[in-house]
Amino acid sequence: MSQPETPSRRRLLSRLTATAAAALLPAGRDNMAQAATGTGAMGDYNTDVVVIGGGYSGLACARALVAAGKQVLLLEARDRVGGRCFNINLPSPYGQYTVEGGAEFIGPTQDRMYSLVQQLGLKTFPAYNTGKQINYIGGKRTTYSGVLPWTGLYSTAEIGIAMLRLDDMAKTVPLDAPWNASKAIQWDNQSAQTWMDTNLLSADAKSLLRLAILALLSVEPHDISMLYLLFYIHSGGGLTSLLSTAGGAQQDRIVGGSQSIALGMARELGTRILYNSPVRKVKQDGYGIEVAGDGFTVRAQHAVMAMSPWMASRLAYEPFDGPLQYRMQMMQRVPMGSIWKVHCVYDKPFWRDDGLCGQVTSDAYLTKLVFDNTPPEAGAPGVLMGFIDGQD
């Protein structure tokens, strides 16, 4: 398994195609962190509240309702909890080590996540951030520290000013009612790409802002409105915080993998979770809510749709009246992010010996962003994790 430190291997961080071409790690049942068993919900159920979706929002909601003394059933279509957070084991001979197949980082401003970590008896560790980052913009390779790479006097100044402008604009968007922003209609009627094309002249500055949007939202700038982008920037404490590792949104990882939080909440909820139970129909009448799937029906006073708008739009609703029709049209037009996550495994994190932190940004290769995703345990192999986002 050991590989010599040949020049071609050393050029890994210079040639991101090596990361893009790496095989995706298998996410089989053994790697899915305690996948649930069972044939799913069967028969009729009665409860106070039915929660549809076993991702983080659904689990946290169900947990809070139980703490308030309510009877709760949570319906999850998959055989596991966590939604887009799931752990995978590395391939042999490193099968005892875990990396994250989905979302993984937490940082300042994400206070409720840190609170959950503490409540569930879990621990965090800092994402590796010692050494220089590598940047490929406009065909040039540079190394840098901090948030912004040097791409030339004009382009570096332009992207820096643009970030300050976006932060200032974002502060005017109310987090509890973004549609009440003074320029909400104007911003909602233009895409982030339109704003970039109108306000940025440098190709390098445009590339950097596109990479930032891909990193944050896994969508192309033309896929989102300026209003949503500004709302997101405000909710995360500003672009510098959202894009930073130390002191920012990528500051920490969870010991045991990010799905450990979901698994901890699931253990607390116990048999209140029904796995392998996709919902097909939601009906509301004068007596409450009826949720139905293949072979089961749940009657409740209230229902919580803890799922993405696009997934929620695939269910059948009754009655399907005017307001719901308008909402359905909206949900069907909310694009989902598009992202692949790739892990490359090495005997050791050799890039650290070269004074590199393993972080790479590029506008030229399939893999636009790379992080050091080495497990925290002593003797763990080196792992580079790359994102393939947007239309790539």
Image (tube, rainbow, N blue to C red):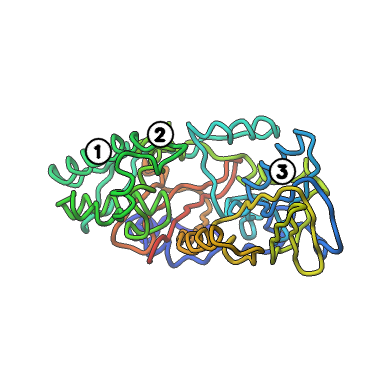
Which residue type carries mark 2? Gly
- The mark found on residue 1 in the picture is none
Position in image of residue 159 (x %, y %): 22, 43
Residue on which disc 3 sits: 62
Which residue type carries mark 3? Ala
User: In the depicted view, which residue is nearer to us: 26 or 75?
Assistant: 75
Q: Residue furthest right?
A: 43
Which residue type carries mark 1? Arg
**Quarter placement of the N terminus:** bottom right
Q: Which residue is drawn at 18% across and 49% down?
A: 199
* Alpha-carbon span between mark 2 and mark 1: 14 Å
Residue on which disc 2 sits: 237
User: In the depicted view, which residue is nearer to us: 190 or 359?
Assistant: 190
Looking at the image, is 29 positioned above or below residue 196? below
User: In the depicted view, which residue is nearer to us: 302 or 234?
Assistant: 302
* Alpha-carbon span between mark 1 and mark 3: 39 Å
Q: Residue at x 56, y 35 (%)?
A: 125
Question: Are the two marked residues, 2 and 3, in contact with CB atoms closer than 8 angstroms?
Answer: no
Left or right of 64, for residue 297: right
User: In the depicted view, which residue is nearer to us: 202 or 304?
Assistant: 304
- The image quarter containing residue 375 is top right
Question: Is residue 130 visible in the rendered structure shown here?
Answer: no
Residue on which disc 1 sits: 165
Looking at the image, is 94 positioned above or below residue 184? below
Q: Which residue is drawn at 72% across and 60% down?
A: 30
